[in-house]
Image: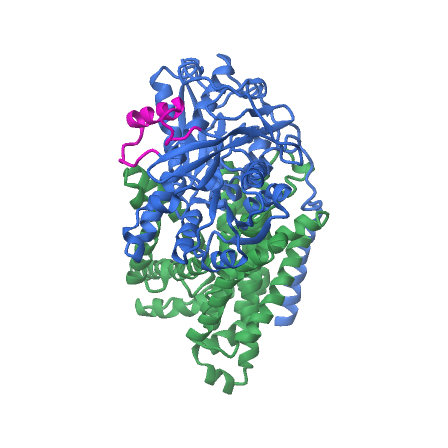
Chain colours: A green, B blue
Amino acid sequence: MTSPTTQREERPAASGAGTTPPRTPGTSRWGALPLPARHLLLAALGLAAVTGLLFATGDLTALRIAAVGYTMLAIAGLQLLVGGSGQVSLGHGAFMMIGAYSMALLVLHQPTLPIVANLGIIVLVSIVAGVAVGAATARLHGPYLAGATLILAVGLPGLTHRYHDFLGGSNGLNIRTAGVPPFLDGLVTTSEWRTLVVWTTVVVGLALLATVSAGRLGRRMRAIRDDETAASMAGIPVGKTKVVAFVIASAAGGLAGGLQAYVLGTVTPSSFTLVLSLTLLAALVLGGIGSLWGALWASVAIVYLEIWATDLARSLNMTRDAENNLPIVFFGIVLILVLRFWPLGVHGALQNLRARLRARSNSS
Amino acid sequence: MRTRSGTRALLASGLALVMLATACTGAGEVTDGADADLDIAPGVTDDSVVIGSHQPLTGPAAPGYLAVSQGAAAVFDYVNAQGGVNGREIDYRVEDDAYDPSQTIDVTRQLVIEDEIFAMVGGLGTPTHSGVLDYLNEEGVPDVFPSSGALAWNNTEEHPLTYGWQTDYTKEAKIQGEYIAENFPDQNVGYLYQNDDIGEDSQAGLDQYLSDAVVAREHYESEVPDLSSQIAEMENSGAEVVVCSCIPTFTALAMLEAARIGYEPQWVVSSIGGDTATLQALLAEFTEGSDAEDVPADAFLDEMLITSYMPRVEDEEDDWGQFFIAIYDEYGDGDGAALTNTHIFGMTQAVMFAQVLKSAGEDLTRQALIDALETQEWQGPGYTPFSSSEGDHGGHQGVYVVQYEAGGNIEMVQEARVTDREGGPIEETDFERLSPEELPFHD
């Protein structure tokens, strides 16, 4: 997941600290590997880490780890779109909804399809939706694009009421999915198995996103982000690249939604409101908009900040109204503080720290 | 270079996906695992038993439903003060799910795994509880008395450990339908309903008696607090009786909107939206600062017909109602709020759970609780017979009808009747309740 984006930000930070140490990986064996292979190795490492974490913690944490996983995938897609190509989407939650409902409908109506086929179909559905929306919005900039995607986030949940019989209205759809395959029975629990399925998909998805971001397409996107006119004069097809970025982001969002439906076994329109889209964007800014690593901190923040804030409110014995609002206030304060002191988010702060440590070890 | 490595990445990820695929059969093909072991008693010690519930303590649904767990907690405090049940104190743990199904799943697992609850009691909400129905049954956690009238709770084949409580929406609607057909013959009827299982199941019952009389079917979405077009449509259609299968907020909105355009139908309100104390508070809140500010909230509710199956707080002759008022005075959480029928809902559930816990005996296991549920002879506090026997986990079997008069009086206009959720007849019942002193539900 080391993308050029990361390196781009590292350099000013490091030079700011004085001496710029020569980067060594280029000469090592690691550096000699092609980028996709490196990303896949990192992905495998990530999966191994999650597996270890799963065995170290209990059944209850498994579900939360899975939540971190699919949220991270959704935010990583958004990162590519916002941090990579400079487009703002307030409708990312809508794509999660498309993915989640696709998963629920597939399990309900085509129960014999294996999960991987379902995930494949969900990616296709999200791509189609992404092309439709992206093509319509490619000519829009900044606030206009945000407004157009806003419509999606606000309007899409209404479809479940319009097609009440098919989509289940406000009660949504409930699905039951197969648990642990027989040969692993007794080795892992159902929730651990689901978490592993989620994370396998997530790390593969992230490796793909990182590869895209590091490749020609990623460079084109960043060129467009920095200056659209200059990019177009350099021969980059601006509209096409923007649509492609939008489609990749929607595919990641849809896949994340599908995984959510798979883990939770229930989809309701109330889970995919505008608040979700805004939370994803706010969390991305909190985690660090410049790098895929930001998505990790962002998803941890989304899943755990609320749990911590609720525990905090309870331990302080606050009134109901205070307890009701504390998680939101807590998130807001953390967001403001992080951005005040580290404008590049949590990931920016960590990089800053690393650069300083390196500078210190060099000067001593 | 890029193309080649891109292909390789695709190949590698394809390989990973194929590996995943071989490990999976159809995602929707659920094989029934072995039945969970019920001869265990998690959360039970010699002097306590831990039970849990998921409730909306915060969020948009909280103002309407917070009272349910407050009421239940007051009754459990009372029971504990009397020495508990079979020497055990009831440790009632309520987790907040904010009426969000994904949070329900998280807090339910927290209750089952961390708190090791003995049973889930009164989990609130149809969309929320639906999400944990399978989980609770797979884990072997008795799922007693969900707070919702969905038909799904009474499915002994798929969910043998789930025991419904509320009179389901279809039974209630059948009795409403029959009452309207008998007492308001030849009048036009309009249905106003929430566009989910409440509306669907209610219409299935109403239509059995009113299919010739119905002139309007209007629905609302619980996310959109506006009923102006629905009520206008209702008036245009000439409906003289309006059946409101609505939650309290929308009952209040409907009455307010009708009053605004000068439309005065006979309101028939289901138990879920017919709590007059809650309605008064809502109406007072909605009229604040408007032209109707000076109109007492009570005036809107005059002559409303309500169906219910529980004791009622307005009824001074109901010994259970008076008993609950006394308990709430002493054990309520003291925030000064008046006792409402929503509190009574939770309190009635709590009494019935304590009763069945008592029947389960000293040697408490989950199986003992299930056996006690299946063989319990229920005698209140509700007004109707109650089924929790093998093959029928339907809960309350019917409703009675009361009429409200401005000023706080209610009059019983039809005693409790029972029916089924299919096309069966509606029958009178000679159900006798025991008084709070006679009913054994604590030591």
As drawn, which residue projects farthest toward the bottom?
A233
**Above or below — where is A145 with respect to A206?**
below
Residue situated furthest front in the rendering:
B186
* Nearest the eye: A128 or B148: B148
Residue A81's place in the image compared with A265, above or below, is: below
- Relative image position of residue B234 (x, y in whole percent): 51, 55
Residue at 45% x, 53% y is: A299
Determine if the magenta segment contains residue B128. Answer: no
> Toward the viewer: B247 or B123?
B247
Quadrant position of residue B392:
top right
Residue that appears at 59% across and 21% down: B374
Residue B279's image quarter?
Answer: top left
Above or below — where is A191 with respect to A276? above
Number of labels in the image equals 0
Front one among B62 and B120: B62
Query: Looking at the figure, which quarter contains the C terminus of chain B?
Result: top left
State the extent of the magenta-drawn residues as a range: B311-339
Image coordinates for residue B132, horizontal then vertical, percent? 54, 38
Does the magenta-highlighted stretch encompass residue B331?
Answer: yes
Vertically, is B72 above or below A227? above
Residue at (66, 63) in percent of width and height:
B8
Identify the residue shown where x is 42% and y is 45%: B61
- Image quarter where the N terminus of chain B lies is bottom right
Q: Position of residue A51 (x, y in %)?
A: 54, 43
Does residue A205 appear in the picture of this structure? no
Q: Is residue A291 visible?
A: yes
Residue B40 image position (x, y, % from top left): 54, 20
Quadrant for residue A179, please give it.
top right
